[in-house]
Amino acid sequence: MKMETQFSKIAERKLTQALGRVRDASRVTALLTNAQKNLILREAASGIRKYEKELLAANRKDLDYARSQKLSSAMMDRLTLSAERIQQIAASVDAVASLQDPVGKILSRTVRPNGLEVKRVTVPIGVILIIYEARPNVTAECASLCIKSGNAAVLRGGREAFYTNQAMASIFKRALKKQRVPEHAVYVLETAHREAVDFLLTREKDIQLVIPRGGHSLIEKVVAQSRIPVIKHYQGICHVYIDDNADVRKAAAIVHNAKLQRPGVCNAMETLLVSRKAAARFLPELEKLIKGRCEVRADEASRRFWPWAKKARPEDFGHEYLDKIFSMKIVRDVRDAVDHISRYGSGHTESIVTRNKQNADFFVQNVDASSVMVNASTRFADGFEYGLGAEIGISTDKIHARGPMGLEGLTSYKYVVTGSGQIRK
């Protein structure tokens, strides 16, 4: 399939027709049994393993394009598939199949004095539009979560991953057709033109929810233009704070993992905060792991320990690098650390490393973020790691869904009221 780069009137008509088919498919997916949904997902996971060569071939085409566009090393890492990563993607789809069905759960049940039974029952949302960047694993994860939750998905990945996403979509189409479910239940856009997104955001009768995953400008644009409710998956400006009496070896390992295990993802550490009392013990230990492997932009107090670090500018704090770069500051204590996070954090994930329970409790109670870690890497803020099977993304909103957004976040509810002829007086 060739990537369309123009959004003409013909393309608009084609997309309108496709949305109608997606809407019709959502009525089918809403009624699927758990067994039917699991068969689709198991078949898709099997297909991902079976068509590994085709996925890698498509990915090579995308990588060639990405190199021509001089994408950053972090973006290239996000885009790149390997045999190991394909196995991980298949495993994440299998993991979603093994989860409990989120549809049809009775959230509450009461019987009124007049005998009416009032139940609140979970239901699918409908058609969900997900806009994301160059991460092919997101295509499989979002498709599998939408199927399991009884929804239909419209997926718009970045143009850098166009061919990989189309190859992944074809695997899900086969799985859906095998179970006699309309293939438009998972629809990956066949155009990379930005005007297609503008058009989709006006289709409130076809789409019930928009989930943008990407940079600041993408999310601001979607929020400003959308006629459809939006759940924001905003920047991951994640901090790790090293408290006064932290175990320095554990702290160094946590920081190293949080920054360098995979620098280009939203739950990677972007700012390191170090207690004044811990700096002399901790920074030499961390230096062994960091120096030469990561660019550091440090305040003056930190540069007394690491004179090789770059001098931090004010804008270096509160910045999402998504690269082998982080900012660093020495703070007075846990209160000062919380104040800094309150000013610069994005509400994604924050971590404290400490042996002081009182300080840990203060941090947990006062930091406003979707995930707060105590003595653990920020990299654990992830749907798979939380036992959600996979995630649609990490919501930095507070309403409807927050943090790693799995199956529950993709359902709504309705009231089912059962009577025996009651009338209201």
Image (spheres, helix red, strand yellow):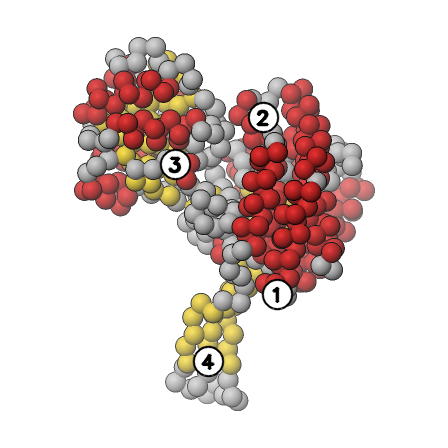
Do labels 4 and 3 touch, CB within 8 Å?
no
Label 3 – label 1 distance at C-alpha: 36 Å
Nearer to us of marks 4 and 1 is: 1
Is residue 33 visible in the rendered image? The answer is yes
Q: Position of residue 143 (x, y in %)?
A: 62, 48
Judge whether 67 appears above or below 335 on screen.
above
The mark nearer the N terminus, 4 or 1, is 1
Is disc 2 surrounded by few (<14), some (14 to 19) or many (20+) residues within 10 Å?
A: some
Question: Image point 21% across, 25% down: which residue?
Answer: 278
Q: Name the residue under label 4.
A: 117
Residue extending furthest right? 10
Q: Relative to residue 349, is residue 64 drawn left or right? A: right
Do labels 2 and 4 touch, CB within 8 Å?
no
* Residue 378: numbered disc: 3
| Secondary element at image label 2 | helix
Q: Relative to residue 179, is residue 116 drawn left or right? A: left
The mark nearer the N terminus, 2 or 4, is 2
Disc 1 residue type?
Thr
Q: Name the residue under label 2.
A: 76
